[in-house]
Amino acid sequence: MKDECLIVLGMHSTLPAVNTVCIGADRGALYLAQQGVRMKAAVGDFDSVSSEEKDLIRSMCDEMLELNPIKDDTDSEEAITYAVKAGYSRILVYGGFGGRMDHTLINLKLAEKYAGVVYLLDEHNEISAQGSGIYQYKGSEYRYFSILALDDSVISLGGMKYPLDHRRITTEDLYTTSNEIIAETGTLTVHSGKVLVIRSND
């Protein structure tokens, strides 16, 4: 398995410093090309860019996957599928929030589908899904730590303001939000089930 890649879907905010392999999806590819960032691949139907912009994208990527605008999958799904097939074990997806709500919900479903692999990011949030296992999070990275059950689950939380020990939570439970890591490292244990982990700042 390869390590990490960054997929840029679009820009609703400033992109952080790029120090990993990049994949651009549609207008995200245009943004990376305009910033002079070389891409492993550019994926999309590119129906919203001019021919000159498309030439710029093509000149800044190793591979360009031009999709038919009449398709079943979104550009983000195609880009994530490309990265999964390429063997990346951690896929950071930037620009998946804001704009169209249907696309935001699709991106959340993709994080659920690729639990532990796909991480959705913007300047305020990191969202991922996690199945059974033990996960550690640095308290210095985000202020708030929230959990939502994707399946009926049993979890424990350590090093946090509101600890839990083998607590059963269902998809109806909403009280597991706005927790805070008070130790240097917080620990989430998913004993069973699958949860959505939302780390955020104001």
Image (spheres, grey):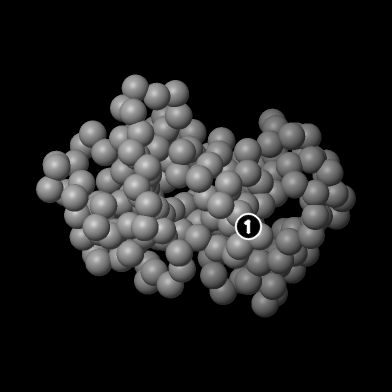
SS of the residue under disc 1: strand
User: In the shown orientation, is residue 44 left or right of residue 150?
Assistant: left
**Which three-letter amino acid code belongs to the residue tagged 1?**
Ser
Q: The C terminus is located in which quarter?
A: bottom left
Which image quarter holds the N terminus?
bottom right
- Residue that appears at 56% across and 74% down: 140
- The percent position of residue 13, horizontal first and vertical second, equals 30, 56
The answer to which of 122 and 181 lies nearer the viewer is 122
Residue at figure coordinates x 53%, y 42% from the top left: 81
Q: What residue is shown at x 33% (from left), y 64% (from top)? A: 38
Q: Residue at x 24, y 57 (%)?
A: 59
In this orientation, does residue 174 appear? no
Q: Position of residue 195 (x, y in %)?
A: 69, 44
Picture layout, residue 195 above or below residue 183: above
Residue 7 visible at all: yes
- Left or right relative to 178: residue 93: left
In the rendered image, which residue does mark 1 sit on? 89
How busy is the neighbourhood of tag 1: few (under 14 within 10 Å), some, or many (20 plus)?
some
Q: Residue 141 at what x, y percent from top left?
A: 54, 70
Most foreground residue, 120 or 38: 38
Horizontal relation, residue 194 to residue 128: left or right: right
In terms of depth relative to the viewer, which is nearer, 8 or 155? 8
